[in-house]
Image: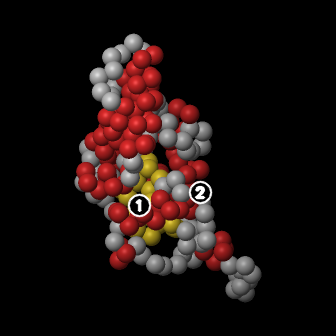
Amino acid sequence: MIKEQTLVIVKPDGVQRGLIGDIISRIERTGLKITALKLIIAQEDTLWKHYNKDDAWFIEKGNIAIKSRQEQGLPIEKEAIEYGKDILRGNIEFLMSGPIIPFVVQGNQAVGIVKKLVGGTEPLTSDVGTIRGDYTVDTYALANSSSRAVRNLVHCSDQVSEAEREIQLWFSEEEVVKYRLANERILYDVNLDGILD
C-alpha cells in the first residue's frame, strides 16, 4: 500500500497563475512523495488516450447537454454523441493551450488522499480547504456560457487502475524514480527503530 501511485497534472491555469509550488506543497505535506515530474506541452493524441472515454460516455454526457439546451430554449443542432465529444474537445483544447506539469505521487492510499486534497471537479462545489475550493472560482455555468472547459487547476486519477494506466501514458518506466524519503520511517516504520539515542 505504501507504494500506491497516482497521477496529478497541474493544468495550464494552475501554471499560468503561479500555483505550481502551492499545489505540490499541499500534496507533499501529507507525507506523499513525488517520484516523477516534468513540464510539457501536451499532445492531442495523448490527451484523447488520457481521457479514455467510450461512446456510451459521450452519449450520456451529450444527452445531459441536450436537456440543458432544451431548458435554456437553445436549438439542438447535433446528435448526443457529438455534444458529448464536444466536452472532451474543450478539455483537450484547454490542456493544449499552455504548459502543464504531470507528476507521479506515491504513498499509502495516494489516489484517495490526492482526490481529497484536490476536491470536486467543479470549484464552486469543492469544499473549502481543497485545492480547487481554495484557489479558483470557476463554475460549470460560467464555463458552459463561454463554451469552454472548467478551469479547475488540477487533474488527479480517480482510482488505482486509472492511475496505473495514466502514469504509463505520461511517463516511461525509467522516468519514475524509486527512492526513499527520510520521513517515510516516521510514517511507515512500525517500531520507529533508531529514533532515540
Q: How many marks?
A: 2
The 10 Å Cα crowd at callout 1, few under 14, some 14 to 19, many 20 or more, is: many
Residue found 40% across the figure and 20% down from its top:
69
Quadrant (top left, top right, bottom left, bottom right) of the C terminus? bottom right
Residue at the disc numbered 1: 166
> Could you say whether the residue bearing mark 1 is in a helix, strand or loop?
helix
In the image, what residue type sits under mark 1? Glu
Identify the residue at horizontal 60%, vertical 43% (top origin): 129
Among the two numbered marks 2 and 1 on one chain, the one whose residue lies closer to the N terminus: 2
With 111 as the anchor, is 136 left or right in this view? left
Label ID, residue 113: 2
**88 vs 134, nearest the viewer:** 88
Amino acid type of the residue tagged 2 in the rendering: Ile
Give the alpha-carbon distance from disc 2 to disc 1, as whole Å.
Answer: 17 Å
Can the viewer see residue 14?
Answer: no
The answer to whether residue 77 shows anywhere in this view is yes
Q: Residue 60: horizontal and vertical position, in percent? A: 45, 36
Measured as percent of width and height from the top left, residue 13 is found at: 36, 42
Q: Outermost residue toward the top?
A: 73
Q: Are marks 2 and 1 in contact (CB under 8 Å)?
A: no
184 vs 170: above or below: below
Question: Which color mode does the image show?
Answer: secondary structure
Can you give x and y, in whole percent of width and height, for residue 70 in the image? 42, 17
Few, some or many C-alpha atoms within 10 Å of disc 2 (few <14, some 14-19, many ≥20)? some
Residue placed at 26% from the left, 54% from the top? 45
